[in-house]
Image: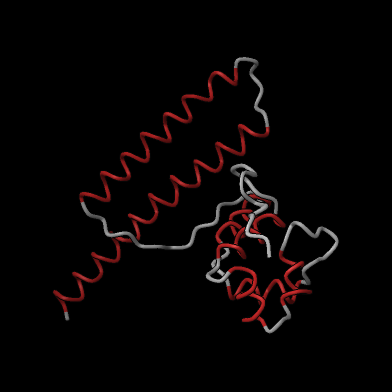
Amino acid sequence: MSRIDPTRGLGPVLTLEQAVDHDTRRERGGPVAVCATLGFSYNSYQKKFSISYPDHLLSVRDFERWLELVEASETLRTIARIKGGVFYRPKPVPATVDALLALADLLARKSRFVGSLHDGLADSRWEEREVLQLERHGNEVIEAVLGIMAGAREAMERDMEVQHG
């Protein structure tokens, strides 16, 4: 089996096929473990997960089983992007001073990225690459902010239970 990841270096936004391949490879044990867990032989079924075999397609039923098994973050982001939305899986982050400082650092880095786009817009036209990068960075900011918000709410509710419980 090749250890070279064909999704490496594809850029900030993946196609649905690339995202499925990427997420499968990121699972503990990779495609071999995913296939074994789903009860399929690796040799035939692995091809359905890999962009190296474009003629082999994953059925909707198998996709649903796969989706229940793997983390699938890239796949869900790709589906949301295709439909014009944003995928967010609530991951509460403790709203500590350190977390807020890390968020401030993230916002500063992302704002520098957005500021760097002005050079590419000298012709007043957005290129697909620029839009996709902007969307990707924007989604990272949204996830970070919502994570801290969820963490703050979780801490508040826990404190209220202690006070009233």
Q: Is residue 103 left or right of residue 6?
A: left
What x and y, as percent, mark residue 53? 80, 60
165 with respect to 116 (left or right) = left
Residue drawn where x is 35% and y is 62% of the image: 92
Look at the picture and state if 87 lies above or below 128: below
Please say if 20 is above or below 59.
above
Residue for point 54% across, 43% down: 136
On-image quarter of the N terminus: bottom right
Farthest bottom residue in view: 39
Looking at the picture, tell me which residue is in the foreground, 128 or 156.
128
Q: Nearer the viewer, residue 146 or 122?
A: 122
Q: Quadrant of residue 20?
A: bottom right
- What residue is shown at x 54% (from left), y 67% (from top)? 71
Is the C terminus in the top left, top right, bottom left or bottom right quadrant? bottom left
Q: Position of residue 144 (x, y in %)?
A: 39, 50
- Tell me residue 57's x, y (percent): 81, 66
Nearer-the-camera pick, 147 or 157: 147
- Snapshot quadrant of residue 65: bottom right
Residue 163 lies, in percent from the top left, at 14, 74
Query: Most extreme residue toward the top, as rendered?
Result: 122
**Figure label count:** 0
- Residue at the outermost right position: 55
Query: Where is residue 133, by image quadrant?
Result: top right
- Is 164 on the left-hand or right-hand side of 16? left
**Of 58 and 45, the residue lying toward us:** 45
